[in-house]
Image: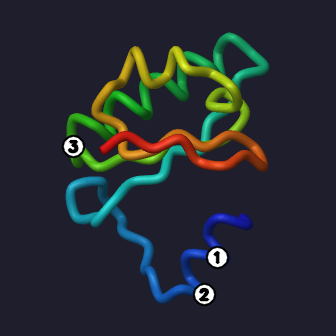
Amino acid sequence: ERILTQLHAEGYALSDSYSDASIVVVNTCGFIEAAVEESLEAITQALDENGRVIVTGCLATGNQNILRRFPGLVAVTGDGSVEATRS
């Protein structure tokens, strides 16, 4: 909710599809194995369909494996953390 509110306040609009979006933000969960798998599938799909992806949420918090597994990510931000970006 906070991410959507901030992006909307800065003039960004939501898109109904990954392919039409300028960038995709995938909010992840890392507490339950099924949620982890769903998050990883969402990241894969977003990268396949768009290529410009930011991963955030608890799965991304302190998890450098996300960058190793998905080297094409624009950024990885955890809950309340400073973003770690790739150029």
Residue of label 2: 9
Residue of label 3: 49
In the rendered view, would you say 28 is above or below 18?
A: above
Foreground pick, 81 / 14: 81
Circle 2 packing at 10 Å, graded few (<14), some (14-19), many (20+), is few
Q: Residue at x 28, y 37 (%)?
A: 47
Q: Is residue 2 left or right of residue 3?
A: right
Residue that sits furthest to the top in the current view: 33
**Dot placed on the residue nearer the N-terminal end, 1 or 3:** 1
Gap in angstroms between the C-alphas marked 1 and 3: 24 Å
Residue of label 1: 6
Instruction: Residue 54 in the image: state x and y as whole percent.
Output: 45, 47
Instruction: Residue 77 in the image: state x and y as whole percent.
Output: 60, 43
Q: Is residue 81 left or right of residue 10?
A: right
What's the residue type where badge 3 is placed? Glu
**Dot placed on the residue nearer the N-terminal end, 3 or 2:** 2
In the rendered view, would you say 60 is above or below 2?
A: above
What's the residue type where badge 2 is placed? Ala
Foreground pick, 84 / 22: 84
Q: Is residue 3 left or right of residue 46?
A: right
Q: Residue at x 36, y 37 (%)?
A: 73
Gap in angstroms between the C-alphas marked 1 and 2: 5 Å
Instruction: Kindly indicate whether the residue at mark 2 contacts the one at mark 1 (C-beta within 8 angstroms).
Output: yes
Foreground pick, 37 / 53: 53
